[in-house]
Amino acid sequence: MERKNTVEIFQHLLSMCNEISAMYKAGLSHILMQHINECSKVQQTDDLSIIYKNAFTAEGIWDLANEWVIRGMEESLEEMKMLFQSQKLLT
């Protein structure tokens, strides 16, 4: 998985704000999870440590993004970055 920083991840999600909102309203939040999982698999490898690290990271991003969406995406990109950096969750 190409390492993205927090701002890039949440910029990407904000760029899909309307689509994400429609998915959640239709009870299809799992599509966002699938999207995040697919994005984590852009690098083809047989290295198990990379495969499992990417899976772990993707699920963490999914949980963070899901919570952010459920809360109405109220926090700005900079607020999200500061929250994660203070917890040493993401760069």
Image (tube, rainbow, N blue to C red):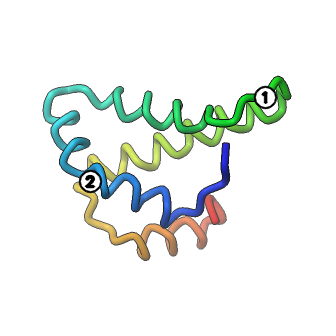
Q: Is residue 50 above or below residue 73?
A: above
Residue marked by disc 1 = 45
Q: Is residue 91 left or right of residue 52?
A: left
Image quadrant where one finds the C terminus: bottom right
Residue type pointed to by label 1:
Thr
- Residue at position x 14%, y 35% from top? 25
Amino acid, disc 2: Arg
Residue 4 spot, x, y in % from top left: 60, 57
Label 2 sits on a secondary structure element that is: loop
Q: Position of residue 69 (x, y in %)?
A: 29, 49
- On residue 19, the disc is none
Residue at numbered disc 2 = 71
Residue 2 versus residue 76: which sits nearer the camera?
A: 2
What residue do we see at 35% from left, 26% from top? 30
Task: Judge from the rendering whether residue 21 lies leftward or rightward of residue 14; answer left or right.
Answer: left
Q: Is residue 76 left or right of residue 37?
A: left
Number of numbered markers: 2
